[in-house]
Image: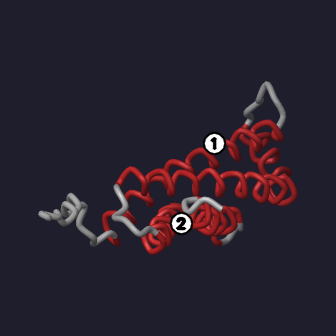
Amino acid sequence: MNNKLKPALLGGLIVGVLSAIPIINYCCCIWTLGGGVLAAYLYIQSSPTPVKIGDGAIVGGLAGVIGGVIYFVLSLPINIFFGMAAMEAQLERSGIQLPFSGMVLLIISSLLGAVILAVLTALGGLLGVAIFEKRKDGVAPPPPQNFA
């Protein structure tokens, strides 16, 4: 397995599950940034060379995509089961008539939430490299010369 994919899977799992659970998701920006930071930290620990800031964004972005898919798969049924009737009743009470059903609104909001998760987790990956990468990215010393 690719050395960026393992940290991204763990970070994405944390992002997706914790962001989809209704009561816990009030802190979703913390979960997304934390998942990206965790993915970057795990990638730094497994990398033999210093990790560049762009690599942190990549591993964080991968974690965000994985987390976004998990979030979409988990949150859509939860929102349909618990929130659709309440949302439609609220729209009806406020007199708002949508040209589409509440189901379409839930799907669009879940997709938008997944995209936002991916972006914020990539930012968390950048932050993770800035915090945890302490190795210097210098030029390797030249090999010893043989003057025989």
Indicate the colouring scheme. secondary structure
State the image coordinates of residue 113 (x, y, percent, origin top left): 63, 48
Residue 105, position as x, y percentages in the image:
75, 38
| Quadrant assignment for the C terminus | bottom left
Dot 1 amino acid type:
Leu
On the rendered structure, is 7 left or right of 106?
A: left
Give residue 112's mark.
Answer: 1
In the depicted structure, whether residue 55 falls above or below residue 31: above
- Residue 147 position by quadrant: bottom left
Judge left or right: residue 125 versus residue 50. right
Residue that appears at 81% across and 60% down: 78
Tag of residue 35:
2
Residue appearing at x 74%, y 35% in the figure: 95
Where disc 2 sits, the SS reads helix
Q: Secondary structure at mark 1?
A: helix
Q: Earlier in the sequence, mark 1 or mark 2?
A: 2
